[in-house]
Amino acid sequence: MSSKRFDQAKPFLTLGIIMLGWLMLPVAVKSFLRVSFAELQAPGQVTASYVRDLQQFWADRTHSKDELIEAARDLRHVYAGYEFQAQRTEAQQAEIDRLERLLHLPSNPRYRYEPARVCRRDLSGWWQQLTVRKGSNYDIPVGAPVVYAGGVVGRVREVRLYEADVDLVSSPQLRLAATFDDDTRPVSYQGRSNPPLAPARGLVEFVPPDIVIYSTAPRRLVTSGLGEFPAGLTIGYVSRLDTSPDGLFQSGEVTLDPRLTELMEVTVLVPLPPG
């Protein structure tokens, strides 16, 4: 009878020994094993991402010629708009460079724009992080800003050879210096704990008491330029502010862009060396 009980308890004893051995390992060994395991997994995860892209390619091939012609026409319209915006951006950048030389001002940080495909997003951490399939093989550094057409995506938290993990703007791990788009005074933004697949929210704090926001006219919250992110990138919109108990500041909820749920392509801003 005792032998039978011992056989039943053997898996639990083995698991306990393994857990105890893991707890007793030095931190450096744990870190090495974790990174090694992640690097071992990376090729399989990146390959699976390429396979999904190939599946989508063949799925797109099933569309009729009329659908493809209509999509191409829509893309031409969008491209024409972006081409005009690019010309305006070049003219504005030339004017900025001229004023910097004239006033002997230091140049703003310059970036290399590195597009990256999203290869993984865990359901348990849907609003916390995503993984892109570019890493140190493309010289992506830790702390690099990540953006998309709607504004801020997040910040690179960890870089491996073929992948990089990005803390999303909705994650409590990410805090930014921000401003309202019509006010230069800095405020503090931080992500919040958001349930998976629910609308993402953030928190804005230390808002001056004289700033007034009406629910019918939400105000845009943007990056201030203090830190890694360039100024003027959209973070989200604020439709209500509440006064803090001490009456010195206000705080409120930030509504984030719903497109964050379906990101497939992002852009990493890789800082260029000064020169």
Image: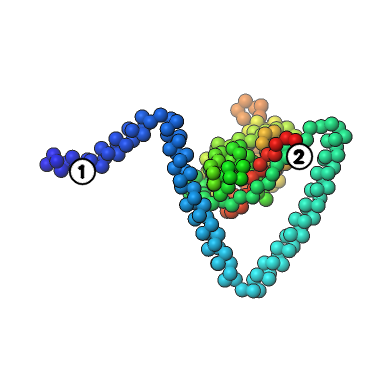
Residue 68, image quadrant: bottom right
Residue 176, image quadrant: top right
Foreground pick, 142 / 215: 142
Q: Nearer the viewer, mark 1 or mark 2?
A: 1
Q: What is the crowding at mark 1: few (fewer than 14 residues within 10 Å), some, or many (at least 20)?
A: few
Left or right position of 250 against 96? left
Q: What is the crowding at mark 2: few (fewer than 14 residues within 10 Å), some, or many (at least 20)?
A: few
Q: Amino acid at mark 2?
A: Asp
Query: How far is mark 1 from mark 2, CA to CA?
Result: 68 Å
The disc placed on residue 8 is: 1
Q: Confirm whether residue 181 shows in the render.
A: yes
Q: Position of residue 155 (x, y in %)?
A: 60, 40
Q: Residue at x 56, y 49 (%)?
A: 133
In the rendered image, the quadrant that contains the N terminus is top left
Which numbered disc, 1 or 2, marks the residue that appears first in the sequence? 1
Left or right position of 96 against 222? right
Q: Which residue is mark 2?
A: 182
Q: Position of residue 79 (x, y in %)?
A: 74, 59
Q: Is residue 263 above or below residue 17?
A: below
What kind of element bears circle 2?
loop
Q: Residue at x 69, y 33 (%)?
A: 226
Q: Amino acid at mark 1?
A: Gln
Q: Residue furthest right?
A: 102
Q: Residue furthest bottom?
A: 65
The disc placed on residue 58 is: none
Foreground pick, 106 / 193: 106
Q: Residue at x 85, y 35 (%)?
A: 101
